Amino acid sequence: MNPPQNDTLLRALRREPTEYTPIWLMRQAGRYLPEYNATRARAGSFMALCTDPDLAAEVTLQPLARFALDAAILFSDILTVPDAMGLGLHFVEGEGPRFSRPLVDEQAVASLAVPDPERLRYVYDAVAAIKRELAGKVPLIGFAGSPFTLACYMIEGGGSTDFARVRRMLYARPDLLHRILSVNAEAVAAYLAQQVAHGADVLMVFDTWGGLLTSDSYGHFSLAYIRTVLDRVRRASGVATPTIVFTKGGGQWLERIADTGCSAVGVDWMTDIGAARTRVGTRVALQGNLDPLALLATPDVVRTQASAILDAAGTSPGFIFNLGHGIVPSTPPDNVAALVEFVHQDSRSRRRPAAVGQSAASRAGTGSSGH
Ligand code: CP3
């Protein structure tokens, strides 16, 4: 397959030098964009949007039409996989995802199975449609939830702040949790391999809730299954598709995540990005880690915060600018525009010999960081 015209992200994932730091944003297509809300209204619901390949392609491309982002990410959701397993996904307005048939008893766990691939055909069709419309401009990121994060929603039946049912099961019936995780790992691996077969250039695993676990449990119940997924995808697709693993709240385990053989480790905003680089060395790329709420301030604040991350991340190859978690719906699009432009310009200028008298602060446009 031909490399994309803008392959900055792919080179950063291989830790090769790039002219500037590539940037894309988790949830870059979403409710902060009026054009997204218009398309979603036209579709009727979030799931109607996900299941229509042309509309999914349309919203995937919306942020790229506004901002010079270095990647597109498939518009879909991590919960499509348990939905295909028959759990009955729906979204309750203002409350987030719900399953009508969560895994409430031993019987439900025993009958859980890897879904018929046909039930996820709409996602593969969306990947193919997006690839066609992207016409090779930037790479396309495919994704899935980690087996553990999917299990959180499947057992709880929806969102939660502490996922107490899952954590109780982990101690009371680890055998049941391991059975769910094994099925999930197989389902996710097949799902990701199909995304690659239909054109995804990069794969990202979202482990949004792994950070709720103890250090020991994180290894046994989340990371081990992420490793299985990566191994199977590598074997199934036969090509070395770059992978990004993101555990929110996983800052203390970055070395262990890097050891899975992923290409990049996603870093949340609670983690020191400079220390992260020192800890993982040069064996992986890093991606992150602006606090998504910084985007609610002014463009000047956004630039100052972004500049601090570029300072800390350093100029050695293998850094991808992103948020530390998904963009929030109240984000002003103008702040996103300021961020993307600043990251490109500032990181470009850092790669050139510094002009006399030009400090990081004056590049950030603040002139007053005073250290
Ligand atoms: O990043 C992108 O632009 C790609 C699309 C994407 C969505 N969800 C679209 C979406 C991706 C990568 C996801 C992943 C996802 N979904 C995760 C992992 C990453 C994370 O954010 O932690 C999780 C946990 C989910 C489950 C999920 N889907 C929740 C909890 C919600 C509701 C939360 C909310 O913000 O309201 C969703 C719905 C969802 N997925 C929306 C979008 C754009 C909002 C739905 C809408 O338009 O009403």
Image (spheres, helix red, strand yellow):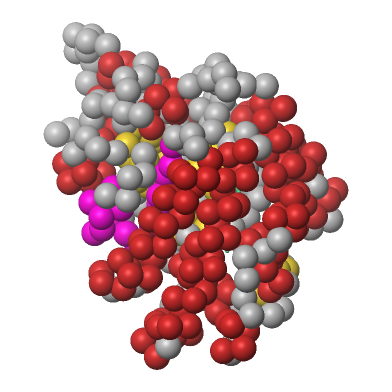
Residue 141: image location, x then y, percent: 55, 38
Query: The C terminus lies in which quarter of the figure?
Result: top left
Residue 163 image point, x, y percent = 47, 78
- The magenta stretch spans which residues? 242-258
Q: Is residue 196 above or below residue 3?
A: below
Residue 270, by quadrant, is bottom left
Q: How many marks?
A: 0
Q: Is residue 195 left or right of residue 324?
A: right
Q: Residue at x 32, y 50 (%)?
A: 260
Which residue sits at x=63%, y=61%? 81
Where residue 160 appears, as percent x and y from the top left, is 52, 75
Q: Residue at x 28, y 19 (%)?
A: 350
In the rendered image, which quarter is residue 124 located in?
top right
In this rendered view, identify the residue nearer to me: 294 or 258: 258
Q: Is residue 218 above or below residue 364?
A: below
Of residues 43 and 209, the one drawn nearer to the viewer in this rendering? 209
Query: Could you tell me residue 331's position as x and y percent?
Result: 55, 46
User: Where is residue 105, by image quadrant?
Assistant: bottom right
Asked if one can make out residue 33 in the rendered structure from this viewpoint, the answer is no
Left or right: 323, with 26 as reference point: left
**Does residue 114 lie above or below 3 as drawn?**
below
Q: Is residue 272 left or right of residue 261?
A: left
Ligand 1, seen in the image, is in the quarter at: bottom right
Q: Is residue 121 visible?
A: yes
Residue, x 28% and y 48% (percent of image)? 258
The quarter of the picture where the N terminus appears is top right
Give the left or right position of residue 37, taking residue 336 as reference. right
